[in-house]
């Protein structure tokens, strides 16, 4: 007889008929109960959900995601709670080991890796951002979500104690930030509306400025995004807090996107001093050096990316910066230095890791066409 995980799966739903079937299929028969919190669907979402659960509850939308999630927590009856969104798919790697982890009385929260795909369909595991977050937590311990948007689970229980652990027995694949979904659902416009209201209420919360910057960046409004991310950095400093690594990653992403390589070069070293193990910052440094035609130092920097710890659990990280993306840019540097054999070797290393990497294929083809590899 198949064992069922002692988990209440909770999700917020509103007009998700195009994706919720795949989400529910990924959890069917695995969890003890499915809790659906519907915030006002007018499509067939609730009808689809009825095929998987009878625990569907209406929640009057008040522009506060934490309130909706906490409402779901109150309805959950299993020992553990897993929260997931309808544009995500659950991937359990090892069911037996996951059971063993849930029986560990010393752990209250498990951190799960989220694979956040971006760009055009079809999804590509090499075109994604990776991060770990606390999606699976023990019920009846007083854990609650905070924040109207980009809500976060409180890291401690009612006794002020929390035992966290990473689990690689679950992955969650998130498709909600792929291009067609963003355009169709106008997520950034919705999020900005909520964030601007939150900024009026909590005008000294630098996280809100960061989230506003992220939404502007998503909309391609890079100058507005740059202004907001700097406001966020200053806000954390005024609070005598170290600005989180996410802020520097976004700042230098914006500067590189705007091709402001001189401006980016001025501060990237300071950011790396603050977060010396953050491979994305080293990768951005390599790009900045490459664009400034400092090729030897860029090669050294990309090699450093290859040697940094791949398990970047505390950071949001772009897939491949520690592997094929750095190999590819090492090849670009060698090509600029007219060292074509080394360039070809680097491109081949990139393609060995990601055989479908079109940029690497094009580079090798061009080298062959120009007879540089004879």
Image (cartoon, rainbow, N blue to C red):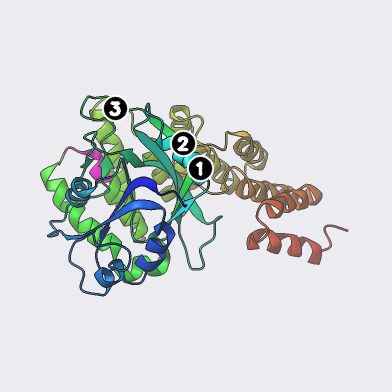
Question: Can the viewer see residue 364?
Answer: yes
Residue in view at x 25 percent, y 36 percent: 154
> Residue 128's spot in the image, x, y percent?
49, 54
Residue 96: give its label: 1
Residue in view at x 77 percent, y 53 percent: 344
Q: Is residue 63 above or below residue 294?
A: below
Task: Examine the structure image and report whether residue 290 is included in the region drawn in magenta.
Answer: no
Residue in view at x 67 percent, y 46 percent: 330
Q: State left or right for residue 372 relative to residue 98.
A: right
Q: Is residue 242 above or below residue 305?
A: above
Of residues 23 and 76, the one drawn nearer to the viewer in this rendering: 76
Residue on which disc 2 sits: 100
Give the magenta part as a residue range. Answer: 204-209
Q: Main secondary structure of the magenta part?
A: helix
> Residue 38's spot in the image, x, y percent?
21, 62
Residue 241: give its label: 3
Q: How many marks?
A: 3
State the SS at label 2: helix
Contact (Cβ within 8 Å) of mark 1 with mark 2: yes
> Residue 175's spot in the image, x, y percent?
42, 60
Q: State left or right for residue 92 relative to residue 158.
A: right
User: Badge 3, how many Cα within 10 Å: few under 14, some, many 20+?
Assistant: few
């Amino acid at each position: 007889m198949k064992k069922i995980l002692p988990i209440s799966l909770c999700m917020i739903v509103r007009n998700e008929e195009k994706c919720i079937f795949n989400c529910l299929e990924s959890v069917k028969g695995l969890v003890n109960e499915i809790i659906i919190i519907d915030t006002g669907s007018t499509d067939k979402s609730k009808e689809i959900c009825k095929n998987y659960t009878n625990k569907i509850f209406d929640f009057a939308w008040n522009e506060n995601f934490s309130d909706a999630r906490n409402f779901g927590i109150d309805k959950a009856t299993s020992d553990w709670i897993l929260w997931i969104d309808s544009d995500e798919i659950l991937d359990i790697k090892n069911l037996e080991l996951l059971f063993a982890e849930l029986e560990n009385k010393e752990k209250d929260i498990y951190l799960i890796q989220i694979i956040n795909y971006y760009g055009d369909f079809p999804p590509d595991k090499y075109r994604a951002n990776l991060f770990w977050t606390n999606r699976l937590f023990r019920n009846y311990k007083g854990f609650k979500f905070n924040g109207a948007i980009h809500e976060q689970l409180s890291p401690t229980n009612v006794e002020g104690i929390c035992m966290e652990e990473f689990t690689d027995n679950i992955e969650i694949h998130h498709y909600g930030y792929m291009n067609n979904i963003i355009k169709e659902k106008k997520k950034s416009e919705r999020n900005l509306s909520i964030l601007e209201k939150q900024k009026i209420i909590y005008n000294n919360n630098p996280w809100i400025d960061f989230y506003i910057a992220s939404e502007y960046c998503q909309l391609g409004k890079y100058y507005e995004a740059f202004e907001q991310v700097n406001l966020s950095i200053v806000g954390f400093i005024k609070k005598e807090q170290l600005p989180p690594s996410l802020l520097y990653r976004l700042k230098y992403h914006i500067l590189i996107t705007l091709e402001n390589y001189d401006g980016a070069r001025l501060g990237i070293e300071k950011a790396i001093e603050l977060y010396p193990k953050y491979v994305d910052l080293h990768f951005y440094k390599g790009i900045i050096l490459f664009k400034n035609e400092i090729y030897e130092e860029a090669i050294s920097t990309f090699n450093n990316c290859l040697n940094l710890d791949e398990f970047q659990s505390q950071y949001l990280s772009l897939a491949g910066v520690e592997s094929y993306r750095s190999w590819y840019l090492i090849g670009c540097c060698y090509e600029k230095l007219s060292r074509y054999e080394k360039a070809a070797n680097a491109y081949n290393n990139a393609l060995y890791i990601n055989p479908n990497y079109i940029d690497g294929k094009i580079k090798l083809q061009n080298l062959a066409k120009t007879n540089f590899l004879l």
